[in-house]
Image (tube, rainbow, N blue to C red):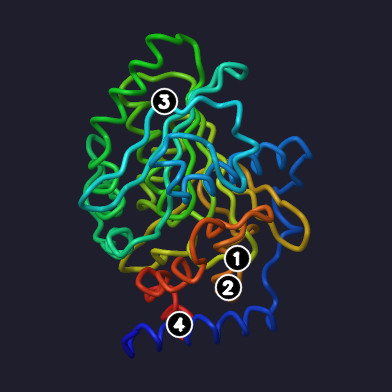
């Protein structure tokens, strides 16, 4: 491990200590509410799907056979993808009981994923005036788009009226957002979107466009997870979150309304750097099938802009 990586890991550790010593945020003001039991159950299910696709056995064998896969045993895996340039991993499954087609994207695990994370160059988002998105996330989706859209189209033709639920953790959440928008723009109806620990994808104009689509979008942030604060909302990036935020903090899941990110949820954090909060969502580890250190050690490539925010 070179000195730059070691230093950034040290910074993450230092600020994780600070985050436990300083107030972590305000969640009892503004237009907020507490998530219902049914909502938490729903979000935990999608978090388990996101954890499942980190298991190579699920992607390679196209079968839900992994530590958290018991919640998905009733689903039929339709297809799975692994791309060459950005190592985008995605799975498409179908639940006939709930009449839903699931699209789940894996988060960062390889060096190629981290390169995508770090390619934070804003580029124009087609047909939306002034909207810009993260180049690395867009390229990660474009690499899988053609095959994925073709598979989803075939499934919808065979099963008209099914809901399409798009899901992902970390980088996978960002790619999931772009996928949901692409399907929406191609005329797919009844789309739902779920993300966990997702970085910001685009600027304010992009976030406003996401809101205007009306796609139900539930974005979960766990405690002091640093990744949702990347790229920084500053003069360089000016990126914003969209969606209805569910902030799992202080043994409560606080809900901030759909729209641009709220100052009353995780954006209220004074210091928000605890890498372990990025690995665990609703008690499930995205590193259950891999060494969790691989996920944590990959974070500094993406979080250097976030670290400098607090220096």
Q: Secondary structure at mark 4?
A: helix
- The image position of residue 260, as x and y in percent, is 50, 48
Tell me: residue 269, above or below residue 190.
below
3 vs 1, front mark: 3
Residue 277 falls left or right of residue 92: right
Quarter of the rendering containing residue 8: bottom left
Measured Cα–Cα span from mark 3 to mark 1: 31 Å
Residue at image location 49% in from the left, 71% down from the top: 293
Residue at screen point 77% across, 55% down:
252
The kind of secondary structure element at disc 3 is strand
Q: Which residue is mark 2?
A: 274
Q: Secondary structure at mark 2?
A: loop
Front tag of 3 and 2: 3
Q: Which residue is mark 4?
A: 9
Quarter location, residue 24: bottom right
Residue beneath disc 3 = 78
């Amino acid at each position: 491990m070179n000195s730059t990586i070691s230093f950034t890991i040290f910074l993450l550790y230092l600020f994780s200590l600070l985050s436990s010593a300083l107030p972590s945020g305000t969640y009892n003001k503004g237009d907020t509410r507490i998530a219902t039991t049914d909502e938490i159950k729903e979000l935990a299910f999608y978090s388990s799907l996101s954890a499942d696709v980190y298991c190579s056995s699920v992607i390679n064998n196209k079968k839900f056979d992994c530590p958290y896969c018991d919640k998905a045993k009733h689903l039929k895996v339709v297809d799975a993808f692994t791309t060459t340039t950005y190592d985008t991993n995605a799975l498409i499954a179908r639940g006939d009981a709930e009449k839903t087609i699931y699209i789940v994207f894996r988060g960062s695990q390889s060096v190629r994923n981290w390169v995508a994370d770090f390619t934070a160059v804003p580029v124009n988002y087609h047909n939306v005036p002034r909207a810009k998105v993260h180049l690395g996330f867009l390229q990660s989706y474009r690499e899988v788009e053609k095959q994925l859209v073709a598979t989803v189209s075939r499934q919808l033709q065979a099963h008209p009226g099914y809901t399409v639920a798009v899901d992902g953790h970390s980088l996978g959440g960002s790619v999931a957002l772009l996928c949901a928008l692409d399907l929406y723009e191609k005329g797919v109806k009844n789309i739902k979107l779920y993300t966990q620990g997702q970085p910001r994808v685009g600027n304010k104009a992009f976030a406003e466009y996401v809101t205007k689509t009306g796609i139900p979008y539930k974005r979960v942030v766990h405690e002091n997870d640093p990744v949702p604060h990347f790229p920084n909302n500053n003069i360089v990036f000016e990126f914003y979150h969209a969606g209805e935020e569910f902030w799992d903090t202080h043994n409560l899941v606080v809900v901030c309304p759909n729209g641009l990110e709220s100052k009353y949820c995780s954006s209220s954090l004074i210091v928000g750097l605890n890498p372990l909060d990025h690995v665990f969502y609703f008690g499930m580890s995205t590193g259950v099938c891999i060494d969790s250190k691989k996920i944590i050690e990959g974070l500094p490539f993406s979080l250097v802009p976030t670290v400098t925010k607090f220096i």
